[in-house]
Amino acid sequence: MNMLWKNSLSDTRHEQSVIICYTGTGNSLQVALALKERLGGDVVSAADLTRGDCRLEHDGIVGIVCPVHFYGLPVTIVDLLSRISFINGTPEIFLVLTCGTFTSRADSEAERLLGSRNLKLDYVFSVKMPENYTPLFRVPPQDKIDELLSGVDGKAEEIASIIRKRSRGNHNSNKGPGFMTGIARGYFIRGRKTSKFRLNSKCTGCGLCARICPADAIEIKDGRAAWVKDRCDLCLACLHRCPFWAIERGRLTRRKRYVNPVLDESR
Ligand SMILES: Cc1cc2nc3c(=O)[nH]c(=O)nc-3n(C[C@H](O)[C@H](O)[C@H](O)COP(=O)(O)O)c2cc1C
Ligand code: SF4
Ligand code: SF4
């Protein structure tokens, strides 16, 4: 298994966590790393797990940290939860959703998928983070981004303390109206088409987008990025993280890109 960020802290807890992280622009990774500092263990990539057989060894606690996509779970997380299995018994499982506004029933979707594998979702949390769905919404102003990002450590402390106390339950404080999940599904299915991406003349063929794409939907062809699948996760990692702003998806996406500072490419 690919350990993204091996724990370097000595931890006095008997159990350590395995935190499965899926991220487009780094928000969920910031939360996952803040939790790793408090719960110990490793952060592993959800995309890497789904490239394999989704079997996981753990030490008692497994967390899933991912963004909300169209009031539901990212496609890769749906795939992961539909196939996940554990080598050494059933762990306690927690879910942390990062969102720009609210989660709607993304948490119930996770519960249902795990339930179909006879697994229980023991804890649910959500953390509000900067919005990255720029085909429709604006990235918040910098002072708002700073405020949200500086709140992550406090929120992680709260989550870790609830898990340590074994206060199982749904602690999602950003649920909002549940009906949005059903309404948004149709838009998401149509929105996932990669034909909606445009590559402008600034592409240098550096390959970053192809390396980070969780859906393996991009390759470099003739020195430029090219989408090789009809549909993708729509995580927007390629659009936001391209160093040259070469990827667009409609007029509104030209305004601004967003990358959480935790995403330093040297990691
Ligand atoms: C395709 C897509 C759909 C999104 N849908 C929602 C949503 O339904 N509700 C919400 O609050 N935020 C939504 N967002 C915003 C992200 O959930 C939020 O910015 C998240 O923190 C991004 O995490 P990441 O940086 O780890 O990818 C959406 C983002 C994308 C890319
Ligand atoms: S689109 Fe951007 S990240 Fe992708 S290859 Fe071109 S320059 Fe690099
Ligand atoms: S093509 Fe871009 S938006 Fe789609 S999954 Fe890959 S990185 Fe994410």
Image (cartoon, rainbow, N blue to C red):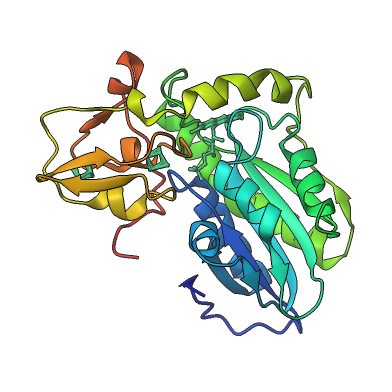
Q: How many marks?
A: 0
> In x, y percent, where is residue 227?
29, 38
| Residue beneath the point at 64% across and 25% down | 185
Residue at (23%, 39%) from the top-left corner?
226
Give 46 or 125, whichever is nearer the viewer: 46
Q: Position of residue 130 (x, y in %)?
A: 50, 34
Q: Residue 166 appears in which quarter of the rendering?
A: bottom right
Image coords of residue 28 (percent x, y): 54, 49
Q: Is residue 230 left or right of residue 177?
A: left
Residue at position x 58%, y 34% in the image? 69
Residue 151 shows in this picture:
no
Q: Quick check: which quadrant has ligand 1?
A: top right
Q: Is residue 258 above or below residue 44?
A: above
- The answer, for residue 263, to whether it is visible in the render is yes
Q: Is residue 179 left or right of residue 79?
A: right
- Tell me the quarter of the picture where residue 157 sits: bottom right
Query: Residue at the location (41% across, 21% down)?
Result: 135
